[in-house]
Image: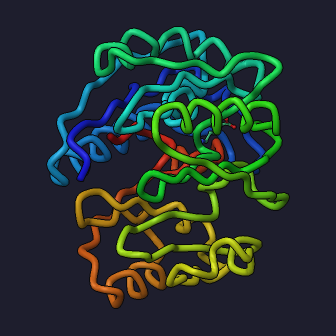
Amino acid sequence: MFKNAIVRKPCRAMTHGLSDADLGLPDFENACAQHDDYIEALKECGLEVTILEALEDYPDSCFVEDAALMTPQCGILTNPGAPSRRGEVEHIEASVRSFYDNVEQIKSPGLVEAGDIMMVGDHYYIGLSARTNQEGADQLIAILKKNGMSGSVVTMSEVLHLKTGLGYLEDNNLVACGEFLTKPEFQKYDIIEIDQSESYSANSVWINGTVLVPKGYQGTVDIIKAAGYKIREVDVSEFRKLDGGLSCLSLRF
Ligand code: CIR
């Protein structure tokens, strides 16, 4: 069960955020309204939400998931592969430290964005993406081992982050799409296949028994509901324009 979440309000500069989505620029006011509802959804799942102020110098800073990994044993500050995002880490550090005595850090030339990390119990799958490199994964695995956990790398080539196409819903259930459907390391899980036409919703998030699903993906709602979960839809269409999904908008721990 998760108790806490950290989010950061979107900034006006979000229109300059990194994106390959080709969906147009996000509307700031609508993004703020969607972000408010996202916070509401986290609270409905029983989380205590820490809300950090917007950072205008970092257009992508509302995607807090990438700057830190909050494990049950320690906090880990990452080192984002996107140069424009690297400075976000120092701005989240105080908040991470407020929850842990033990805070570790990924250092250059190691690069990690935590959107590439999927937790399954005390094991962490680490996607080798354009943002997370082998050196970063090696450092992370060493930190995890030192703290009684484990990690392994996953090769990938189709999407931005590991969790763009994959999500663990607990109870051995995995939502997956595209290249992740056939990876040998995931065959031991019960895979809930997300149709390619709804691939954005593979980034659905389990929180304390409820699954947050992005609004507008009825096929995904139906299939996750059929697996026995309660669903809370959240409209994050403005964040999708920046390649961001539901998981990216919070740290949950
Ligand atoms: C970026 O490209 O870094 C942002 N525009 C989106 C980050 C999404 N984060 C995530 O998938 N964990």
Residue at 37%, 33% (x, y): give it. 73
The correct choice, above or below, for 58 with respect to 187 in the image is above
Horizontal and vertical percent position of residue 26: 57, 39
Question: Is residue 102 shown left or right of residue 57?
Answer: left
Horizontal and vertical percent position of residue 194: 58, 80
The quadrant in which residue 178 appears is: bottom right
In depth, the one of 128 and 161 nearer the eye is 128
Count of numbered circles on the image: 0
Residue at 66%, 54% (x, y): give it. 162
Q: Quadrant of ligand 1?
A: top right
The quadrant in which residue 223 appears is: bottom left
In depth, the one of 123 and 213 nearer the eye is 123
- In the rendered image, the residue lying farthest to the bottom is 226
Q: Quadrant of the C terminus?
A: top left
Q: Is residue 23 visible?
A: no
Horizontal and vertical percent position of residue 77: 54, 22
The correct choice, above or below, for 53 with respect to 159 in the image is above
Residue at 71%, 17% (x, y): give it. 107
Residue at 34%, 30% (x, y): give it. 6
Q: How is the image coloured?
A: rainbow
Q: Is residue 151 visible?
A: yes
In depth, the one of 222 and 192 nearer the eye is 192
In depth, the one of 63 and 218 nearer the eye is 63
The quadrant in which residue 105 appears is: top right
The correct choice, above or below, for 174 with respect to 205 in the image is below
Question: Is residue 171 shown left or right of residue 69?
Answer: left
The correct choice, above or below, for 102 with respect to 219 in the image is above
Horizontal and vertical percent position of residue 233: 33, 64
